[in-house]
């Protein structure tokens, strides 16, 4: 085996120095935080990329000069870099002391671009100039080239104005961004550089990192902005990820096989709770703040990741004192603790995103006060419910997404109307179904239980301009697979402004069309299979109908339906409208049928079926439906000989919840007065559903 003369001469001395450095204890693990080296006399910071928050790890690294070109080595959990005081490689352990390492064939100049490879235990470093180039040195004691500098490519072949680079966690390419914003991929074996495109940002990017998913992070020296770049995009673009520390001299390192997470045992980050299309979770580069003494209202919540709508935080910083009217002024009350800048965005076009043009309040300075602010909603704002986001922080300006080191974010669901418009909030109803129809089954009325809310947007002449439904699946005690839909009797589907319909499940905008096709009247088909949206707890057969089976997962929906021609209020159906369940296609639904599919519908008593219902089922088993030829108001539908229905609409009032029966507990046993209510045609025991009239032990 051939070695250079210089390598022979210094090998023993190099090895002794390297082994002497082993006295420094390595870091305990591959940390999620990034390391940032700054100042002309080296200081090392830890950066939480979740929020951009940073803290000084050490102001004394055992040198009176710079340390640059740092990289984290996951082979031994040390930081390596270039020590200007010694003009050679240094290693830093958990004591934050730099130990110099003598190299064979040292180029004899200082470097500020470097990183440690992930597929080999080697340190790579680069300097622009015809006399320099890209170098590597093995850190593997078993390697024949241990601590010997090898020139990969000269500086004429690789000539880039860059300030740091980083190894991808899996493909062994180096990535960097030059001062003009050009993204490059560098082959570490040959030194060949490939331009991947303009990222849309310029500057000195002195700290570059990767995470385990292959996302590239670049930190700009001048303002501390940390950008994220998705290399899988056809045109990779820098998106603001966090507001980090700024410095004239910056260099970064990070364990690239670690995910970006908040490592603290207790949650130390505040997130919003709007649907994730708005940038809410960390995965979506959501709005997030490090916990500090600056926040909205009186309290602040902390999470390791966001609670996305319908799970919401108890926000208390913003009160909308007057309605948000498109093209008009409104009043909001803002309470802040500490001093900072308030910004508020509104999704005025209701496309599920906040843009820079959708700001309601821009960088308003407030200091430990409660203030009333006059705001103007754009005249172009669409009517209906939408989301607003408020962020309060000591930094300005910031975007609607991304991390900052302090402050708080609060998301609010609000209603936007036009001047002269008004809103009617319908009574909320629990809609409960027994899905054994036309047989009575166990009659526990918990096969599907949905809490349904609705509201109407009215014009000044009391015409219905828009309807919105919100719902939550409260129980699913069904062995059968059921879909759920809502029919608006006598409303024609072609009067719906389909371009403005908005449909969400669990806060996620749905691509499927909620307007069912080929129906006589308007049918909003929420889902073909309710069970597919929930997750059962271990050893539980049903959803929230069995004792000791709490099932924490949620299934919620919201639908906004605007009409092309407003409909007079007296011609519009009344709440709870006509909700119904139907059999999932190609699924078993009792011994009376073979896969009855969409044609098997179960409605509230005396409600008309949709035009897709299979009316040949009427009159089978216990059903005593009688339908007139033209579906007139004389219909007697979905009831047995005694008038008992297969579906109920229950309004317990705004202060009380309705408790459904336990699995296989007949509702007549759980609520004994229900029988009297039915037999009296609703004239007696009208509060049969209250808890005071129940057998509590038989309720879920």
Image (tube, rainbow, N blue to C red):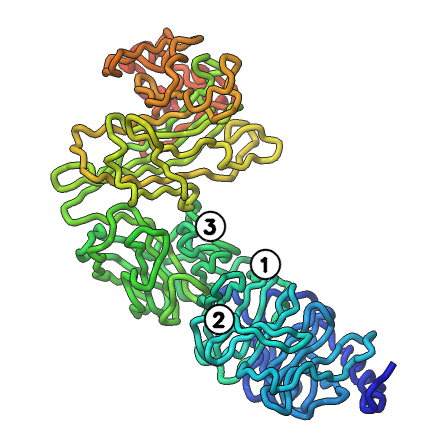
Q: Residue at x 24, y 38 (%)?
A: 456
Vertical placement of residue 134 versus 611, above or below: below
Q: Which residue is mark 2?
A: 197
Q: Which residue is mark 3?
A: 307
The quadrant where residue 487 appears: top left
Q: Residue at x 64, y 78 (%)?
A: 191
Mark number, residue 265: 1
Q: Residue at x 46, y 12 (%)?
A: 439
Instruction: Say whether residue 59 is visible.
Output: no
Q: What secondary structure is found at the residue carrying circle 3?
A: loop
Who is closer to the viewer here, 134 or 244?
134
Mark number, residue 212: none
From the viewer's perspective, is 577 left or right of 313? left
Q: What secondary structure is found at the residue carrying circle 1?
A: loop
Q: What secondary structure is found at the residue carrying circle 2?
A: strand
Residue 159 placed where, x, y %?
57, 84
Vertical placement of residue 292 versus 96, above or below: above
Who is closer to the viewer here, 532 or 51?
532
Q: Earlier in the sequence, mark 3 or mark 1?
A: 1
């Amino acid at each position: 085996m051939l070695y250079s003369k210089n390598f022979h001469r210094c090998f023993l001395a190099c090895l002794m120095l390297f082994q002497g450095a082993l006295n420094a204890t390595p870091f305990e693990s591959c940390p999620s935080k990034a390391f940032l080296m700054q100042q002309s006399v080296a200081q090392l910071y830890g950066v939480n990329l979740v929020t951009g928050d940073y803290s000084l790890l050490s102001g004394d690294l055992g040198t009176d000069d710079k340390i640059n070109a740092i990289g984290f080595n996951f082979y031994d959990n040390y930081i390596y870099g270039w020590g200007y005081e010694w003009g050679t490689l240094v290693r830093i352990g958990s004591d934050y002391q730099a130990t110099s390492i003598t190299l064979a064939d040292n180029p004899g100049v200082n470097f500020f671009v470097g990183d440690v490879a992930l597929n080999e235990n080697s340190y790579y470093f680069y300097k622009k100039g015809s006399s320099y180039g890209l170098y590597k040195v093995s850190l593997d004691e078993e390697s024949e080239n241990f601590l010997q500098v090898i020139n990969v490519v000269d500086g004429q072949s690789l000539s880039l104005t860059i300030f740091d680079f980083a190894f991808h966690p899996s493909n062994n390419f180096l990535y960097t961004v030059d001062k003009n914003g050009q993204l490059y991929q560098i082959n570490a074996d040959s030194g060949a550089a490939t331009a991947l495109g303009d990222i849309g940002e310029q500057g000195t990017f002195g700290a570059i990192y990767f995470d385990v998913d292959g996302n590239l992070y670049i930190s700009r020296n001048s303002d501390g902005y940390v950008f994220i770049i998705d290399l899988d995009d056809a045109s990779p673009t820098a998106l603001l990820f966090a507001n980090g520390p700024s410095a004239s001299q910056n260099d970064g390192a990070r364990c690239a096989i670690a995910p970006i997470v908040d490592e603290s045992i207790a949650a130390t980050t505040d997130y919003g709770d709007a649907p994730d299309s708005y940038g809410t979770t960390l995965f979506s580069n959501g709005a997030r703040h490090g916990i500090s003494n600056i926040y909205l209202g009186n309290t602040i919540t902390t999470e390791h990741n966001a609670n996305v709508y319908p799970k919401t935080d108890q926000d208390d910083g913003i009160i909308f004192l007057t309605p948000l009217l498109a093209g008009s002024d409104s009043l909001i009350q803002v309470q802040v603790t500490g001093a900072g800048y308030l910004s508020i965005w509104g999704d005025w076009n209701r496309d599920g995103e906040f843009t820079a043009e959708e700001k309601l309040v821009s960088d308003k300075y407030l200091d430990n006060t409660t203030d009333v602010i006059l705001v103007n909603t754009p005249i172009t704002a669409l009517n209906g419910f939408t989301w607003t986001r408020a962020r309060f922080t000591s930094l300005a300006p910031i975007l609607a997404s991304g991390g900052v080191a302090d402050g708080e974010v609060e998301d609010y669901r609000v209603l936007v109307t036009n001047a002269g418009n008004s809103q009617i909030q319908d009574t909320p109803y629990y809609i409960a179904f027994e899905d054994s129809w036309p047989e009575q089954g166990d009659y526990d009325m918990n096969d599907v239980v949905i809490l349904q809310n609705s509201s109407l947007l009215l014009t000044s002449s009391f015409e219905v301009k828009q309807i919105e439904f919100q719902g939550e699946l409260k129980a699913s005690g069904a062995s059968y697979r059921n879909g759920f839909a809502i029919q608006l009797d006598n409303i024609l589907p072609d009067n719906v402004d389909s371009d403005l319909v908005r449909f969400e499940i669990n806060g996620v905008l749905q691509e499927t069309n909620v307007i069912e096709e080929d129906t006589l009247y308007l049918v909003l088909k929420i889902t073909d299979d309710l069970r597919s949206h929930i997750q059962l707890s271990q050893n539980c057969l049903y959803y929230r109908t069995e004792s000791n089976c709490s099932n924490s997962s949620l299934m919620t929906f919201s639908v906004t339906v605007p009409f092309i021609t407003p409909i007079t209020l007296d011609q519009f159906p009344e709440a709870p409208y006509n909700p119904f369940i139907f059999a999932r296609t190609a699924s078993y639904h009792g011994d009376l049928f073979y896969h009855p599919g969409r044609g098997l519908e179960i409605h509230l008593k005396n409600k008309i079926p949709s035009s897709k219902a299979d009316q040949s089922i009427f009159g089978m088993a216990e059903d005593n439906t009688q339908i007139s030829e033209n579906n007139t108001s004389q219909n007697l539908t979905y009831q047995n000989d005694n008038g008992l229905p297969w579906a109920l609409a229950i309004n317990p009032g705004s202060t009380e919840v309705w408790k459904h029966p336990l699995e296989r507990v007949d509702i007549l046993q759980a609520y004994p007065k229900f029988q009297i209510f039915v037999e009296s045609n609703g004239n007696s025991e009208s509060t049969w559903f209250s808890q005071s009239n129940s057998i509590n032990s038989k309720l879920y």
